Image (cartoon, grey):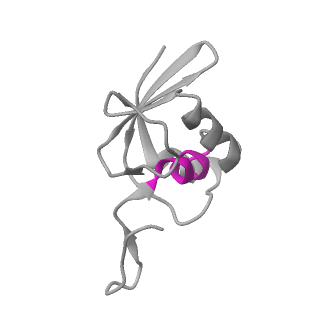
Amino acid sequence: MNKINKNEKNQIVDEQRIDNWLFRSRLIKSRAKAQKIILDGYVKINKIRISKPSVKIKIGDIITLTKLDSVFILSVENFAKNRLNAKEAMKLYKEIKIM
């Protein structure tokens, strides 16, 4: 699961699975779809193509996501414990480039 600092009241998450993060940040509609695009090779972390949905990401990692004819390059800014509304989800990443 996620590493959680249990000493603090708000439980700060300092890493998260890439499939969970893509789903919770509303970049992908379901966790199953997130796992599929990862397995199909459409996701890179720090310029390295990943093939396992269980790969952990950290704040500051650069995610490259290829969807259809678009390429999204994002910086991981935060994590969430569950799926957020669209406005809050946008705080989880910073768009670097969309092609």
Q: Which of 9 and 34 is in front in this view?
A: 34
Q: At 55% from the left edge and 36% from the top edge, which residue is drawn?
A: 38
What residue is at 59 percent from the left and 39 percent from the top? Answer: 27
Helix, strand or loop: magenta stretch? helix
Residue at point 36% right, 84% down?
6
Q: Is residue 91 left or right of residue 48?
A: right
- The verdict on residue 23 being magenta is yes
42 sits to left or right of 76 = right
Residue 73 x, y percent position in the rendering: 42, 27
Residue 99, compared with residue 42, is above or below; it is: above
Location of residue 4 in the rendering, given as x and y in whole percent from the top left corner: 38, 74
Residue 24 position, x and y percent, is: 58, 53
Q: Hey, which quadrant is residue 61 in on the image?
A: top left
Residue at image location 55% in from the left, 53% down from the top: 20
Q: What stretch is highlighted in magenta?
A: 17-26
Magenta includes 7?
no
